[in-house]
Amino acid sequence: MTRRFALMIDPVAADAARTDFADTFTAVDAAAPALSVGELSTQRGDGVFESIGVVDGHAQEVVPHLERLAHSADLCDLPLPNQEQWRQAIERAAADCGPGEYVIKLILSRGVEHGPTPTAWVTAAPASDFSAVRANGVQVVTLDRGYDLDIAARAPWLLLGAKTLSYAVNMAALREAHRRGADDAIFLSRDGFVLEAPTASLILRMGDRFVTPAPNGGILHGTTQLSVYEYLAERGFEAEYDRVPASDLTRADAAWLVSSVRLAAPITAVDGIALPVDHRLTADLNAYLLSPRD
Ligand code: PLP
């Protein structure tokens, strides 16, 4: 049977002095309606979220996800989440996940028009089977994101470093990639630099050096990329943040899209130009990403 789980959270202040938050959680039927029609997350995409991978009941990289949730909330002027309250909500959701891979989502919304505000909930559901894409990889196309690399500093109200619920543009980019016969997309800045994929970070290998676009406000700082960098450092590789010109994509010795649930998908082609695939390192990365990590 497909297991699904949902928990409404009554958010408490970030600095609340308490240790047990069980009485702030209400388990609800994940298949039944639970939100008000006045929810601003559904009306305007006005809220932030996180997707956390769960492997055999272990929620991965909880602290980096909670830190990014807080960063996103801060950028959006939402009340800061109480880290311990959300950690306990994740623990509760993870306890309900069976063996295999699941995804836990954390949602913090502006709330209901004219109150109450904010609204918060956590869900858990089985993850799709990504084993084939982890082994066989993805063909990508590059798509213009329409702004320059330095836009975040000039226009912080675009909320580019926040993981907001407004993913319509990201989903449209994936549909455009599919229309062009590819599996996924890589966004480029208008001035010709690599940004990220619509739902993943990008890592390139150039010889023994690994590089990912610097998360300077214009893209999300990926939790999976952070984990991969820890792993590469342990193996003695140089792994850096940089400005990555679009022309580097087809010069790479290997490249991956990495994200919390799909994990590491090797890139097999960029705009129809084949890229070498490092099968052994890809398998190592995915084995590492499937091992329990905090
Ligand atoms: N960039 C974007 C736009 C994303 O939506 C995601 C994940 O959903 C990522 C990067 C990768 O982040 P993470 O590794 O934390 O899943």
Image (cartoon, grey):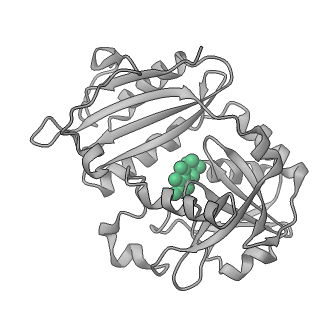
* Farthest residue, direction right: 280
Q: Is residue 194 visible?
A: yes
> Within the image, what quadrant is residue 81 found in?
top left
Q: Residue at x 29, y 67 (%)?
A: 157
Q: Is residue 249 above or below residue 74?
A: below
Give the x, y percent position of residue 275: 83, 68
In the rendered image, is residue 240 in sight?
A: no
- Whether residue 182 sits left or right of residue 80 in the image: it is right
Relative to residue 42, is residue 247 depicted above or below? below
**Residue closest to the far front:** 179
Q: Quadrant of the N terminus?
A: top right
Image quadrant assignment for residue 30: top left
Q: Residue furthest bottom?
A: 191
Q: Residue 143: percent from the left, percent from the top?
A: 58, 73
- Most foreground residue, 49 or 36: 36
**Residue 242 occupies quadrant:** bottom right
Q: 259 left or right of 288?
A: left
